Image (cartoon, helix red, strand yellow):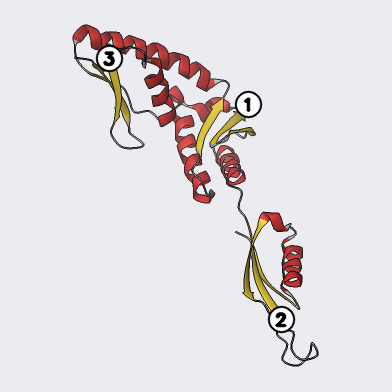
Amino acid sequence: MRQVTATGQTVVEAVESALAQLNTTQDRTEVSVIDEGKKGIFGIFGSRPAIVKVTVKTDPIEEAKNFLIQVSEKMGAPVTIEVHQDGKQILFTLKGEKIALLIGKRGQTLNSLQYLTQLVMNRFAEHYFTVILDAEDYRKRRNDTLTQLAHRLAEKAMRTGKAVSLEPMPSYERKVIHTALAENRRIKTYSDGTEPNRFIVITPNK
């Protein structure tokens, strides 16, 4: 977090001085007036300068993006990142020559990075954001796999009359399962456990 305390004959001058030092604009900062100052007699005697503290606002998306760039480089798989925002959902699409390293077995590495990136972003954000990481259309392929798995395990639950538990999944993937089976009146789904080990249970409707 970058911030400076600056002085000036007026609050406006103090703010302008701070912005010049930070090399930024006022819309990207938060201004706190410590002392409004005092002109004094004839503008000289008893005068007191205005004092302000100006803090540069942190962009949560940029912080998350920088985190991903640093982590991917340390993993030996540098990436370029495209960002797409849909309301409070942020999609980071990763591209690179060694992208498979960041996806990992069954997307476990990608899911872990997604979880950590969401923590980083929401540490700096005023509102809660949901982060989705994608690479090489992995999410679409994974969604297709999860939908097929959901229907197959729903059939098993109905056939055996017993509940079936899935492996732990991030909330985004659990939503895919819930949605895939939402119209099946013969079964019901619910989530159990605590994050990041929360999982779905498919149980017959009795």
Which SS class for mark 1? loop
Residue 3 appears at what percent x and percent y? 64, 64
Residue 128 vs 96, above or below: the answer is below
Q: Residues under labels 3 and 1: Cα distance?
A: 43 Å
Q: Which of the two discs, 2 and 1, sits closer to the camera?
A: 2
Residue 14: quarter of image? bottom right
Q: Amino acid at mark 1?
A: Glu
The answer to whether mark 3 and mark 1 are in CB contact below 8 A is no
Name which of mark 2 and mark 1 comes first in the sequence.
2
Name which of mark 3 and mark 2 comes first in the sequence.
2
Q: Residue furthest front?
A: 41
Residue 61 appears at what percent x and percent y? 59, 43
Q: Residues under labels 3 and 2: Cα distance?
A: 72 Å
Looking at the image, which is closer to me, 126 or 65?
A: 126
Looking at the image, which is closer to me, 48 or 94?
A: 48
Callout 3 crowding tier (Cα within 10 Å): few <14, some 14–19, many ≥20:
some
Callout 1 crowding tier (Cα within 10 Å): few <14, some 14–19, many ≥20:
few
Residue 45: quarter of image? bottom right
Q: Which of the two discs, 3 and 1, sits closer to the camera?
A: 3
Question: Of the numbered discs in the image, which one, if any, rests on residue 49?
Answer: 2
Residue 64 appears at what percent x and percent y? 56, 43
Return the residue at label 1.
97
Return the residue at label 3.
187
The answer to whether mark 2 and mark 1 are in CB contact below 8 A is no
Residue 41: quarter of image? bottom right
Question: Of the numbered discs in the image, which one, if any, rests on residue 88?
Answer: none
Q: Residues under labels 2 and 1: Cα distance?
A: 56 Å
